[in-house]
Image (cartoon, rainbow, N blue to C red):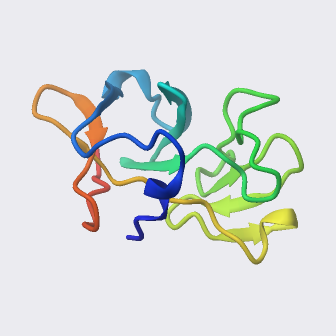
Amino acid sequence: MSDDWKSYPGAPADGTVICPLADVPEAGTASVDLEGFPVLLARSGGRLVAYVNACPHQFLPLDYRRGSVLSADGKVLRCSNHEAGFELETGKGVDGFGVGCSLDPVPVEVTGDGLVRIGESGADDQKRR
């Protein structure tokens, strides 16, 4: 996993708590602002992923115009501004304005007490839950 997310202003430190896992619906998304650093969390099929909540097309939050941006089949995150599509698992652009670019993944882990936090940089810490 790339550390590109750390280049954004206000990128949080490893171990920063994002939210309780219960705040991220299964087959849905949750948008969290960590003191100016936007994070989009998504769960589908037991998988939890996190990305910087900024569409690479215009850097607006993916959920700027509507709440959940996860496709009905749980495989694509769709920007609510210009319908750019990004693969849930990798963040890679798969359709529309998303083709040729990708979302910046943020490593996350779930603690024993059910909190989602920033995982260790450079590691593949996105966990199944």
Instruction: Look at 25% across and 46% down and name the residue there.
Output: 14
Looking at the rendering, in which quadrant would you find the C terminus?
top left
Instruction: Look at 45% across and 34% down and name the residue there.
Output: 26
> In x, y percent, where is residue 95?
81, 68
Residue at the left extreme?
A: 112
> In x, y percent, where is residue 47?
38, 51
Report the side of 54 relative to 107 (left or right).
Answer: right
Q: Is residue 22 above or below residue 92?
A: above
Report the side of 40 relative to 34 (left or right).
Answer: right
Looking at the rendering, in which quadrant would you find the N terminus?
bottom left
Front residue of this view, candidates 128 and 105: 105
Q: Is residue 2 above or below residue 70?
A: below
Instruction: Look at 25% across and 66% down and name the residue there.
Output: 123
Q: Is residue 82 above or below residue 18?
A: below
Front residue of this view, candidates 5 and 73: 5
> In x, y percent, where is residue 80?
81, 40
Count of marks, rendered view: 0
Residue 101 sits in which quadrant?
Answer: bottom right
Report the side of 71 relative to 126 (left or right).
Answer: right
Residue 31 sits in which quadrant?
Answer: top right
Front residue of this view, candidates 21 and 62: 62
Instruction: Look at 73% across and 58% down and name the residue there.
Output: 56
Residue at the bottom extreme?
A: 100
Residue 2 sits in which quadrant?
Answer: bottom left
